[in-house]
């Protein structure tokens, strides 16, 4: 059966045995580690939604590949409707969890591979698309979560992969065997790598001919031998571990660096190996899909931030203050801009030779450019509205202290009728929404750097046509 | 036959005899006045496009009302496709003329009336929708251009219509007769009123019960007795009259104030008369449609401005300069933002009881908020890229002067291989694109004030839902 | 002797016995608590600077009151030179510590009191100024650090103090005795309250007649009985406690809520008691001085952030990338804007009746408006330049782990020649500079809310003069 | 006597016989041409102010060179006070005339030459400084206005001067004679060249060794044989000529291109001739001074725009509308930012070897960067506040028309008690203030391009010091 419940999902992860380090120590029980679990819960929300009355119809669709209902997070888009559903589901789920649900990157990889493996095969007669489709069936039939292993650590950024002093700064094939390949390298910022069953690796950039070993794409289980997940630090990372002052009481986000310490990949899971001319296309397709994704989930996150701001106004007694209402409008406006451009990118998608649909890349990048600049402004507005306690609210443990607890309760009281606990909880949530670096840094760097989005727009806009039409108005003939 | 050619359109205007003043003098031959003609040519482009191979399919569609192909500028949207076509055609035409083509406001009125007259009739049993459909048939069968008479002069803006010292500061019914009504007032900023065959008047704001006389909507020919068009001044308004230094050699824009000096309107052309509770709905619908429209045409105008900027870079020898390329990206990004939000508003439209489709108002207003703020920035970037001659280029007449002409030609030369005349023409066009107030002020005030767009977004967003979802994350039950 | 060394300062704090809670537990040794100590070190830098060759001349000046050299942080400005020195010292020290050094608020209080106590006495014949000067002598002779107790917790913000359900939501006099007064209330966001020897309390807002009990200003030692410091949580607050991943290895910031649980204040330390008409003036003066202060220290903090960004470019191999250099310019530009407006406010200061100099309030508020909006943008630019590891860098403890330490060292290597440890340290510092909420929230809320700065500008600008001069140009006589 | 009255100034111009073309025709009476006269009146305001009670003390100062009181517009700064007076006078006068008064560029040239001619002589033993001081005495004794001839036409901007196809695209020495030199070229954007007695020519950029002929600086009367002033077109340039709809009823601005058609310059007026290594320094000094100047006059122009906005609020009945008041604050904030940074640049000036004071260049460029970006925003805000009539107000001639005049008066009425003529006049002034290209383009390009300001900031900031201080915090030793 192709649709898992949330519980089945959690249990399926419990069976996996990935190698994980955090704060210098090995983590053996991933699922019950409170920090990691909060992230897993966010992904679990995508399973839960598939089984909830009000969202099932949006999240579940029939797969033309396996002829069964599947969770849309395993379904590369084969229609405009599919493209649009991606953004709408992302907004709904981003708004539901208030952070990253960590399941879109895998779909972005599946979508990119479903286009590009076909194109490679057309040119080179390779068997990548067939392999990929087998893998996709596996994913769909078992309702798996995939993680995107794209961003290499890059070493000296001014140098190409094969120019680096240490050749492993971009993940590469170090051995080709009859049964598969061995790869080495590290992928950074692997949000949700432990919430996933599979890691899909793509190149991180366009490659030159001499970079053959770096032109590699594949998928492997997250507990494959040689894989090491090192969970990095983010601003509020000790809160779940301490079990207090959590803010978002249900969900969170974590980002490991995943090291590929000579990992074996069987040929049936290899989707690119040496065709350097397609590396750029793979990453461009993936990135464009991922930027479209962000236009949904980040709009959803702004919805949360707006809800928190409005609630704080209620709790502070400032819900009628006109300059704060203006700031609410500024927040909503940014959500709608991200969302509008992203959903437009979807509606304007086009069918590719493989049958998969691809979005309008200029509009998707336009959305992402706003995200990279404006999410920080949204967070700033939220802090402005909520007030200074966002940065120095006493701990829940202070509240529990017999001597000072009552005093803190007394002095943190806001508008009449609002339980002080609610005000405290909401202030703590504001801290999480505005200041959790795992979220806020992804606003800037997720889906590639700000400059990458800009360059994409310039590259894919029709500059000559614009010049030509303008010359006509000026009366210039040339 | 429902599709006119450009020539037929011009001749149809020639037959009309509107009362027109400009610079204190009566203008009797509207069509051949060079200033007005440049504006009429812009509207003519909508007729021309309907007859051009490459655009016919986009501009012409079959009307379900008359069962004939019509120009889409006479077709209220009865499908998502229709809504989307509006924005795409607007971008194409805005990009083609580089200014306002002055035919969208009429369609915005037709679209609003096609929704609201139906709703009024449902509530009050009035005959407005039937009258309106008769009028619409007339418009479609004769391929007419309509002008939106919406913005009243408003007097003291803090006062409601009936509180004004002079009761005529908002257009009102001054007499009700058996055959029709007599109206008095003035509508400001009537872009293209002389390029139109009909003026459609709507209220400019929501009304209270006591403002019954102001709740009036109707349509009349632009040369109806009592109508006086006073063409106002804009920054470059003497250029066409002088016949030199025109910039946009093909098109321009003009904006009369239209005075209704006791004008008779027969009942069959009256679409609202006294139902104050629907005045607000009419203006909200019109405005939302008009904001959607702008998301297309203004994106097209940015396309022109970007073309001009790119051409100036070629002509100045700066096409490789990296900070200028960044500014080009900033221009394109703004075009795509306007367009993306507007086209998203269209795809997300919904069918109304009358069968007409209405756009997503939040997204349409999100688009317009960007226009109101960012078009000025686009103009600034264009001037930055083009250089200081935008403000002080010698006149074409200086070029023609035997003594100094050769010197000016010598010193205005730019990059090798570019004829100096072309550089001069493009600089002149930049002046027009960046500094024509008839265009730039409409970026700010067209479709209602900036604040109106903001208030719309706040009013139409689900604030309570956002709060509720956020409280769940904070662990607040209430 | 009026100038303490850093060591003497630390020892002087060690002798104090304030009541402190953090994470629900009593902290008895403030000075050796690693979290609090990092904050105390920042204040200590103001003592160190007074004894360093290169900064002594800037930090030390002779006090006209005691006729001895004093640390300028105890010296209310009695000349333009003093006003300017405030901003320059703040920039230098802010740039040295990379966070808040927590000693300016006390000086801002001293400066405000030195103006307003004089004015009150002039009107009411009260003895406040004499008392204040005695206190100031004490501060100067002992080189004390004072903390500003200004921001009340405020309860329902729409209500005035005496309208609140709980009358203690603004600090107030609950008893008047022959030897002094008893006060009750709480002051929030008391940055550095444990780095200070004295707390100076001022009203937080203008007051009406009925708010007599709230019109109170005074100074008391930070370990006065009844005072309770509850150290609140900020984003990175566990780092110093854990002793790793600290980022800024030398300095930090913490912000207690200070509860006044029926605290006795002797009359000689009371500087306002009941004169409601001067409450507003006190807070306006304090706020204006504090906004001026921020124009220095926050420019210094941007200097640090710019240094970190430039270093990251060196370490990543991106120091020649043109769009990153543009971002560096954008960072510097913001520092200079804050600084320029603040230093202009100082040069344009005016002597007040008491002899103290007061800054130009419009310019000081102009500086603060930029801070409130642009510091978040500076942080965003820093993160953009530094890269995604800002949010998920593995812990120093991972580096120390025998199994994965070498792998992490391998994969975090940047540009050739840069020790990987340096790159890791700098990334960790970037996290602290960009994402420490104790700093970033103060950018927004320090010195009053954004709206307060805006209102100040409107109130203190000559609007009628602007109208009058403009009418002359238009040829309007009235 | 060194101080002229306004009348004497006008008469002194009347005696000059420059060669002038406008709209293809020779203008022989410059002073009485209404378009040019409006510009001359703006410069005349600098003479008037020297003779007005309320401004004399600010405008007039004793020259150390001639030992007489002179107008400060002829006085290179020899103290901090002089530097500050420049900005304050500029703000006052910019606010008085609402446009450019066209006398600061000459002073900026004098100031730059007074520094650099000294430095050249020190290095090369040339006689430039002595010649310059003689010229300065002449200027001061006769209270002359000088014009800055800096911006060359530049041809292909990617090429250096001597690489151009036509070698005259940068002004150059074409002949060296015993009595002087002959120069050829053209200087663009010569604001106020006909309001000036002398043109001071400087190079427009740093030069390489091979560009010797282009390293030339000198001063000549504006009616020197061979000089041709071609007055370019700006947006509202026909208004004064038509004598109606003028807006600013007192002052305006015009910008000729000045062609040097083999002009003889006697040696005693040559201040640089061949020392290419000082060309860059001259233009950098001039530009920095000019950016400082703008921080005053443009703040003054915003003061006018704010006055116009406030008056329009009174006239429209919207003076209590909160979002409009917020926009007023946004306008004032921008004025104070320009001004604050510019005045800070002045106070932070330093004495140069010649004795002249030079401003802090980073702060001056910080001010100018805001101008280049924010003046357009101020204009946008003004239009937003004033309303749509800014772009289409009927002409004064319509008002005079017997038939429609009364109707227009009726319908343009605003708030009760405000004469409709006043509202019309103020709307017309708003058009001038917001949309006159001679002003608005100078906001962007005056004092060099936006990029030039940015590069200056990067070049003159201490980047290494910032890195070093930051490394200390991170615990990095290197």
Image (tube, coloured by chain):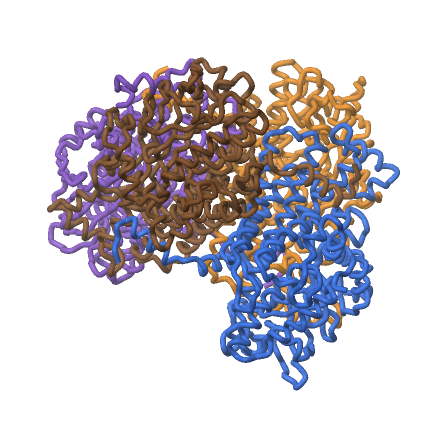
Chain colours: A orange, B purple, C blue, D brown
Residue A89 visible in rendering:
no
Horizontal arrangement in the rendering, residue D252 relative to residue B327 (left or right): left
Residue B274's quadrant in the figure? bottom left
Which quadrant is home to the N terminus of chain D?
top left
Closest to the observer: C128 or B11? C128
The location of residue D155, given as percent across then percent down, is 43, 20
Horizontal arrangement in the rendering, residue C464 relative to residue A430 (left or right): left
| Vertical order, B235 against A350 (above or below) | below
Residue D355 visible in rendering:
yes
List the single residue furthest toward the bottom: C178
**Residue at x 85%, y 41% (from the top left corner):** C400
Q: How many labels does the image show?
A: 0
Horizontal arrangement in the rendering, residue C145 relative to residue B282 (left or right): right
**Residue at x 69%, y 52% (from the top left corner):** C57
List the single residue furthest toward the right: C402
Residue B174's quadrant in the figure? bottom left
| Vertical order, C126 against B429 (above or below) | below
Which quadrant is home to the C terminus of chain D?
top right
Closest to the observer: D67 or B38? D67
The location of residue B385, given as percent across then percent down, is 45, 29
The location of residue A181, given as percent across then percent down, is 78, 22
The location of residue C64, given as percent across then percent down, is 65, 65
| Vertical order, C352 against C128 (above or below) | above
Closest to the observer: B254 or B407? B407
Closest to the observer: D251 or B361? D251
């Amino acid at each position: 059966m192709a649709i898992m419940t949330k519980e089945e999902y959690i249990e399926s992860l419990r069976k996996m045995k990935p190698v994980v380090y955090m704060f210098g120590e090995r983590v053996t029980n991933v699922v019950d580690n409170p920090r990691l679990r909060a992230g897993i819960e966010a992904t679990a929300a995508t399973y839960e939604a598939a089984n909830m009355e009000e969202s099932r119809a949006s999240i579940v669709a029939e797969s033309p590949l396996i002829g069964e209902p599947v969770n849309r997070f395993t379904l590369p888009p084969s229609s405009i409707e599919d493209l649009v559903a991606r953004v709408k589901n992302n907004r709904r789920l981003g708004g539901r969890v208030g952070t990253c649900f960590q399941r879109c990157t895998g779909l972005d990889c599946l979508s990119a591979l479903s286009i590009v493996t076909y194109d490679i095969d057309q040119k080179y007669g390779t068997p990548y698309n067939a392999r990929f489709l087998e893998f996709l069936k596996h994913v769909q039939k078992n309702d798996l979560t995939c993680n995107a292993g794209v961003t290499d650590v890059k070493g000296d950024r001014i140098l190409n992969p094969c120019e680096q002093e240490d050749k492993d700064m971009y993940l590469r094939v170090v051995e080709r065997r009859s049964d598969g390949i061995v790869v080495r390298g590290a992928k950074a910022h692997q949000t949700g790598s432990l919430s996933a069953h599979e890691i899909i690796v793509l190149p991180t950039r366009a490659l030159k001919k001499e970079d053959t070993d770096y032109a590699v794409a594949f998928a492997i289980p997250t507990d494959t031998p040689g894989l090491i997940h090192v969970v990095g630090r983010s601003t509020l990372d000790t809160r779940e571990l301490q079990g207090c002052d959590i803010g978002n009481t249900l969900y969170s986000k974590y980002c490991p660096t995943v090291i590929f310490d000579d990992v074996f990949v069987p040929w049936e899971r290899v989707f690119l190996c040496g065709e350097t001319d397609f590396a750029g296309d793979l990453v461009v397709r993936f990135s464009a899909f991922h930027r479209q994704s962000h236009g949904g989930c980040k709009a959803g996150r702004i919805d949360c931030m707006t809800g928190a701001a409005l609630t704080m106004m209620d709790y502070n007694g400032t819900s009628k203050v006109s300059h704060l209402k203006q700031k609410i409008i500024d927040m909503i406006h940014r959500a709608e801009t991200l969302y509008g451009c992203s959903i437009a990118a979807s509606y304007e998608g086009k069918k590719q030779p493989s049958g998969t649909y691809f979005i309008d890349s200029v509009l998707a990048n336009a959305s992402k450019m706003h995200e990279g600049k404006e999410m920080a402004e949204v967070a700033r507005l939220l802090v402005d509205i909520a007030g200074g306690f966002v940065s120095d609210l006493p701990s829940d443990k202070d509240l529990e202290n017999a001597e000072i607890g009552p005093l803190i309760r007394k002095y943190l009281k806001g508008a009449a009728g609002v339980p002080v606990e609610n005000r405290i909880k909401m202030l703590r949530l504001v801290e999480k929404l505005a200041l959790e670096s795992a979220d806020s840094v992804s606003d800037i760097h997720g889906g590639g750097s700000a400059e990458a989005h800009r360059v994409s727009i310039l590259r894919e806009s029709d500059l000559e046509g614009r010049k030509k039409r303008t010359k006509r108005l000026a009366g210039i003939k040339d």
